[in-house]
Amino acid sequence: MYTAQSFKDKFKTINSVDWTKTQSVMDIIQSVQKDKDCALKSYSGQFDNVAIDELEIPWSELEKAVSSIDDDLRHAMEEAHDNIRRYQSSIKLSDSAGKELFQKVHPLKRVGVYVPGGTAPLLSTVLMTAVLAKVAGVNEIIVTTPPQPDGVHPAILAACHISGVDRVFQVGGAQAIAALAYGTETIPKVDKIVGPGNQYVALAKKLVYGDVGIDSIAGPSEIVIAVDESTNAKWAAFDILAQAEHDVEARTFLVSENEAKLQEIYGQVQKGLKKQPRESIIRESLANHHFNILTESRDETIDIINLIAGEHVSIQTNDAADYVDRITTAGALFIGDYSPEAIGDYIAGPSHVLPTGGTARFSNGLTVNDFLRTNSIIALEKDTFMTMAPGGMRMAEEEKLNAHYDSLASRWEDLK
């Protein structure tokens, strides 16, 4: 159990970055730049233990995957697809309507979506990224996902088909990021890479940024849950278990002024843990990255939540709605008993690709606007130029940039 102050002291070390893998990731990137497809096939054997003849998965396999999954799963993915598309369409940027000063909005031409492999087929990641790109009008959407001994999971391929993905490649890890950033004989270079991954993927995205756009450098997934005496302990406990089962590095924070409720919920966590197929993952996550934080007031609870700046923040108190305007650093807010974080992971509508590791202090979750770019357009009429020019001339004079001054003054003098 932490007090607010002891947690603040501990928190200083929580988001430290491990840079020891940087050199190995750089080596992979340089190898892919040099040897292209050959490097990708070699790394598939080395890291994934899968021998790959063809990197691209044919479209016919995606069509087959849609037919192979059960009707309930297909309908669920189609419902999620529609909810995501509807939500993102409502926030899409549009061209401004000014006459002399305005902006034009253009979709990116080609984006790459990284879908993690590992122990869980993250079909939801496809929907939460590719649908946004589709709504934005991106010309070509490419998915890379680690190869598997029995082939890429059909649910991932079906999600690609439902989302309108154009091409899918069975390539994972830092080598997939390098391939998307620089292109190979088979995989085309993209304009932007989105999607979560492990530490090697995150480091690779950091290293290629500038040569290609990225959404963020994702760290371990995390949830902050605020509770009080009214909270359903069983429900909150399952929310903790749901987050911890992601990964041994997943972080869970339980914050309350009520010590008895903190203890009750953690008791429910231990009870529910024994029934989980991913029990060993959850145990390690909870042992190293779970924090029970006892606060003295609601103000202190809010202070702790804003300090953590969590990826997911769930408010399960009797006054949950009152927190909305006061939580200023959160990837996504889940308000009340009927908005569990898991509903946001799958089907609610907003993307589950969110800032982690405290980066919600300065960034936000993925939206359709991340797949759009704007360019300002200045098309002044004569009268507007004549009004603005003297101010610009005076500033150019002060900066001692004489050609700037002359560019404005020559027009102003000739037109006055």
Image (cartoon, grey):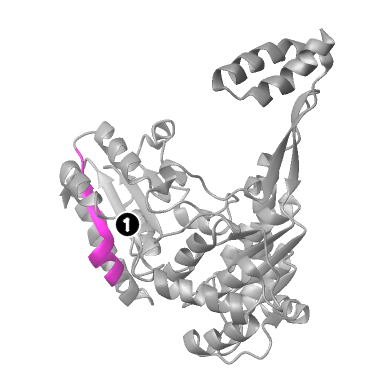
Give how far across and how far down residue 328 sits, in percent.
41, 36
Residue 197 in sight from this viewpoint: yes
Is disc 1 placed on a helix, strand or loop? strand
Q: Which quarter of the rendering shows the C terminus?
A: top right
The image quadrant that residue 248 belongs to is bottom left
* Extent of the magenta region: 284-295
Q: Which of 73 and 21 is in front in this view?
A: 21
Residue 231 appears in the figure? no
Splitting the image into 4 quarters, where does residue 409 fall?
Answer: top right
Residue at left offset 27%, top offset 61%? 289
Q: Residues within 10 Å of mark 1 (few under 14, many from 20)?
A: many
- Residue position for label 1: 252
- Whether 286 is among the magenta residues is yes
Residue 351 against residue 97 in the figure, above or below:
below
Q: Which residue is drawn at 74% across and 37% down?
A: 94
- Left or right: 141, with 278 as reference point: right
Task: Work out whether 90 lies above or below 191.
Answer: above
Residue 348 position in % (x across, y down)? 57, 52
Residue 19 lies in the magenta-colored region: no
